[in-house]
Image (cartoon, rainbow, N blue to C red):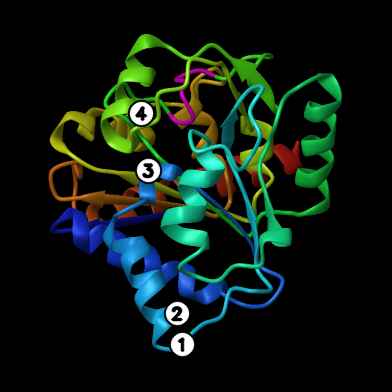
Amino acid sequence: MKYVVCNSENAVYNRVYDELERYIEDGAVFSFSESLIGTQFTKRMIDEYKNGKYKYNHIIFLGQKEFTFIQPEEESSFYKLMKKNLYLPLNVDYKNIFYPKYFDNQCIEDYRNILEENLIDVVILTVNSLGEVLNYTEVTNENNNIHIYKTSAREKNSLRQKYNLTFENDIISIGYDNIMNARNIFLVVLGKDKRKYVEKIFEEEKNNNEVLSLLKTHNNLTVFVDKDAGYKTEEEVNRLIKAKNRKKAIEEIRHLEK
């Protein structure tokens, strides 16, 4: 696990982009939350593409969620939202963009196969004010893999305000098993109201039902926070991580000696 503290939201997204740069190459597979739209992260991606630093025509993008019973090109789709604000400015080859869709159960199986065939190199997630990641705070049998969930009134209102999406359908989303299969997880936590969730990642013992508890077991998790969400300095947290890793190593050695 890696912990990164920055002074501002823009600094956080600059650092996220700096880390992503290590993986920008032909054949890479990325999965981004729509909440990245309009941030310093996407602005730098687009600017550096325009400056000729990177090309994205051979990179695969996997969507995290979509409305049910909707065609990708409809104006109210997450795909169209991301296409307009990111994929089109990056000149991504549209045959390399995959989003879940649902018209029948075969659609779920089809996207499950796409996820299995395209191991994600970097998945970028965000934590909201309720401590939710991908709309849940707990991992259940329902959401551990690609699934359909009811769109709450709060989420509908948020989508309307942020992205002018006014669809009333449910949502099909990837699950936590799909995320945990990614090679790298970037988790972005911003704002003082989310500091308690950052603290939970590092202070609380593992709880198998909590999303944050599951994510912190990933070998390549990087947590990015601004100074408002960060409850300790990078140095303090890195010492904490090293101490826990030493404790884990000692426990594993003792187990083998039995």
Q: Which residue is identified by label 1?
A: 53
Mark 2 = which residue?
49
Q: CA distance from mark 1 to mark 2?
A: 6 Å
User: Could you tell me which residue is drawn at 59 percent across and 40 percent down?
Assistant: 251
* Earlier-in-chain disc, 3 versus 1: 3
Q: Is residue 132 magenta?
A: no
Examine the rendered structure and indicate whether residue 59 appears above or below residue 114.
Answer: below
Q: Earlier in the sequence, mark 3 or mark 4?
A: 3
- The kind of residue on which mark 1 rests is Lys
Question: Which amino acid, mark 2?
Answer: Tyr
Q: Nearer the viewer, residue 63 or 18?
A: 63
Work out how far the residue at label 3 is from the one at label 1, CA to CA, in angstroms.
24 Å
Could you tell whether 248 is left or right of 166 in the image? right
Report, in whole angstroms, how far the alpha carbon at label 1 lies from the one at label 4: 33 Å
Q: How far separated are the C-alphas under marks 3 and 4?
A: 10 Å
Q: Residue at x 36, y 51 (%)?
A: 37
Give the x, y percent position of residue 177. Answer: 68, 33
- In which quadrant is the C terminus drawn? top right
